[in-house]
Amino acid sequence: MKLWGLAPLLALFIHGVAGDGFVKTGGIRFLLNGSPYYANGFNAYWLMYVASDPSQRSKVSAAFREASSHGLTVARTWAFSDGGYRPLQYSPGNYNEQMFQVSFRIQTNVAVFYLSCFCFIQPFLLQGMDFVIAEARRFGIKLILSLVNNYENFGGKKQYVNWARSNGQFLNSDDDFFRNPVVKGFYKNHIRTVLNRYNSFTRIHYKDDPTIMAWELMNEPRCISDPSGRTIQAWIMEMASFVKSIDRNHLLEAGLEGFYGHSSPQRMSVNPGSSNIGTDFIANNRVPGIDFATLHSYPDQWLSSSNEQYQLSFLNNWISAHIQDAENILHKPILLAEFGKSWKVPGFSTNGRDLLFNTVYYKIYSSARRGGAAAGGLFWQLLTEGMDSFRDGYEIVLSQNLSTANLITQQSRRLYQIRRIFARMRNIEKWKRARAARGKRIGN
């Protein structure tokens, strides 16, 4: 329980030194204000959705406050909600802020489309994201904003394909999201709208706000219809280039789970079971414009018939292989962007979850300590009290899951200490160079 007493002081130091600069990459590390930066953080997909109801915004504030007090520095969340109930994007190009008419032009090599509609739309979705960014800034937390979902939750690629069908496109599957020029035009319009959004709270355009650490092209992209990987490879190349044409300030990642593909056949045995889903960890992350690699890990889902010991052994190997490849092949940082253990899985114990967290955190810490490519980890998912309807089995409520919360705080402290050591070394080198330069001037 000693770590709980350190939490407020820890938050003061960690967030106090973070400053307000953009996170960059330098070789295999994240850099903030010139010093190595480590992302001990969390997923909270629900932030914009909850903040869209002003009466519920206190939950967003509480989550950031509790996260900050445990030294957490990064949150990953959705910047999409396409169609369906309480959407951010009501239809292609129409966003929930006021009653208005939008007309925009999408030109492809197939046709030109003019889309226009009058619709009554809820006024708070975009303002909800504005609020999330403003609160994250207030509590010294950086954001990774995902731009679309692979799955049907909150619309995803299926909704985009259905919109295109409604506009006369004949599409065979949801995977045409990655191929059809009209669908890609819809998605590019969403990218353009979000990146150019002017925040009603901070008065800063999203693309100019250092509170945002990175954009994510898609949550867990998959293209089962093309296991060769060529479809997603081409899509990532096109979309990465498009994002960078609008925003050069922020980092960009693809949203990958980390499955190896045909560019590294010797590594495919590392994948859990049958995971030939059209992605390729090496090839996809080599795309120009993709600034860092990501990894997800759910041994309790992927290896559900195996015992806990085997799952932890897989986790060790899974993380080690990707850190090694990030360093030696990609030459980029790698972020473990999702991990967790569900209490809904038979045989769950808090001790088992803590073992998994310890395994992940130690792998990251060991890499960071030697200057390696592991740049942090984001557990799935953070909730605050009074959010029972959002419980999915993986949730961590810091005020309730005390042993796990202590591990989180400990990791924050360890990564902060590493950052201080590297910053001190950098200052010593700067002092030595300055001293040498003074000596040369005196000698002359």
Image (cartoon, grey):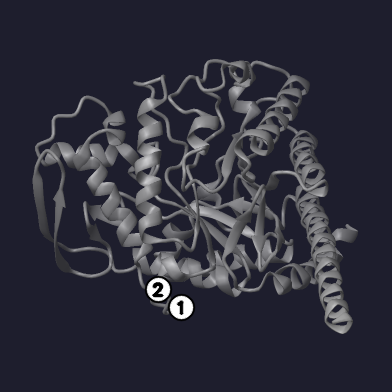
**Residue 313: percent from left, percent from top:** 76, 23
Could you classify mark 2 by the number of other residues whose Cα lies within 10 Å: few (under 14), some (14-19), or many (20 or more)? some
Residue at mark 1 to residue at mark 2: CA–CA distance: 6 Å
Disc 2 marks which amino acid?
Asn
Residue 39 position, x and y percent, is 67, 54
Q: Nearer the viewer, residue 38 or 263?
A: 263
Q: Position of residue 155 (x, y in %)?
A: 33, 43
Q: Position of 155 compared to 137: left or right? A: left
Could you tell whether 152 is left or right of 366 in the image? left
Q: Are marks 1 and 2 in contact (CB under 8 Å)?
A: yes
Image quarter (top left, top right, bottom left or bottom right) of the C terminus: bottom right
Q: Secondary structure at mark 2?
A: loop
As drawn, the label of residue 151 is: none
Direction from residue 76 to residue 6 in the image, left or right: right
**Which residue occupies the foreground of this view, 272 or 420?**
420
Q: Is residue 256 left or right of residue 349?
A: left
Write the residue at 59% across / 70% down.
Answer: 21
Q: Quadrant of the N terminus?
A: bottom right
Q: Is any part of residue 357 visible from this angle?
A: yes
Image vertical order of residue 417 relative to residue 146, above or below: below
| Residue 310 figure quarter | top right
Above/below status of 75 relative to 322: below
Task: Determine the secondary structure under disc 1.
Answer: loop
Residue at 51% in and 37% down: 286
Three-letter code, disc 1:
Thr
Which disc number belongs to residue 199?
2
- On the image, the x and y values in percent for residue 354 come to 78, 40
Return the residue nearer the eye: 407 or 197: 197
Tag of residue 202: 1
16 or 86: nearer the viewer:
16
